[in-house]
Amino acid sequence: MKKRWMRLLTELSSRKWVSRTAGRAASSGWSRRWIPSFAKTYNIQVDEAEKPMSEYRTLNEFFTRRLKPGMRPLAAGDDILLSPVDSLITGMGPIQQGTILNVKGQDYMLDELLHRSPYQQKYMHGYYFVLYLSPTDYHRIHSPVTGKLVESEHVPGRVYPVNDFGLRHMPRVLSRNERLITYLRHAHGEVAVVKVGALNVSSIHYADGAPLPAYERGQELAYFAFGSTVVLLMENGTFEPRSDLTVGSIVKMGEGLGRLQGVPASPRTGEA
């Protein structure tokens, strides 16, 4: 019964107007008074922030704070895939015939996650990570590779929570929520960075207002407020993960997730 009520409340609160209202409140001038208590509640490492807490004008500005230079060193090696975010790994593994298996007990189809994009064919037998950002984490998203922009797509959707409850008990959250998808071509193949909005995330933004033609590894790509999730997809046959990473591992932005390898032949649009 409790679980049923939680699902009902989550359904009711997943409307975009709820998140927009929360976003407006967090962007108001008086919200700055919440910053110290928020930082204390979530044990945020304020000494890493680019500016002192007193210089942030709104709560949302603090959520989307940049860090001091050098706080997230990049793993050495151009063939090392970087974590794009500070996060908890809530799912990882090979993609099996276009299906991401068992993310908190649920399976996801690439066709739905990537909004029926023809690019899905490149990832049908690739590799994936589901990277969850809690309110504690640094909330800017960086490029995991040096590469050129292939395509960017904004997919409207709901704003269900992407925490443990949302992933376990709400159907296909990662595929139903708002998403901003960036496809990047690198020296060994292609990656898709799927940025998934969540409850109280009023929108997802590119760092420069629009996607750039190319990115360097570690370059700022996008950001969103509050907790959310990035699904990172690697093209078929191009990635070997670190052997010590498992579901439940915590990674920092710039940390190596594994090694990029090979130069695969790119399938034609619509080719299986």
Image (tube, helix red, strand yellow):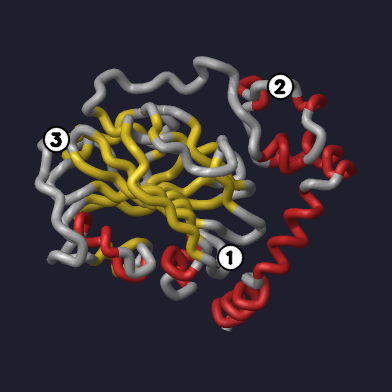
Whichever of labels 3 and 2 marks the residue nearer the N terminus, that label is: 2
Q: CA distance from mark 3 to mark 2?
A: 39 Å
| Nearest to the observer: residue 150 or residue 157 | 150
Q: Can you give x and y, in whole percent of width and height, for residue 196 in the image?
A: 49, 56
Q: Residues within 10 Å of mark 1 (few under 14, many from 20)?
A: many
Residue with the mark numbered 2: 51
Residue 210's disc is none
Q: Can you give x and y, in whole percent of width and height, for residue 269 in the image?
A: 20, 61
Verify CB contact (< 8 Å) between mark 3 and mark 2: no
Left or right: 99 as drawn, with respect to 86: left
- Compared with 114, 77 (above or below) is above
Q: Quadrant of residue 15?
A: bottom right
Under mark 2, the amino acid is: Lys
Under mark 1, the amino acid is: Val
Q: CA distance from mark 1 to mark 2?
A: 30 Å
Residue with the mark numbered 3: 261
| Nearest to the observer: residue 69 or residue 148 | 148
Residue drawn 65% across and 21% down?
50
Left or right: 112 as drawn, with respect to 52: left
Whichever of labels 1 and 3 marks the residue nearer the N terminus, that label is: 1
Under mark 3, the amino acid is: Gln
- Compared with 134, 43 (above or below) is above
- Local secondary structure at mark 3: loop
- Local secondary structure at mark 1: loop
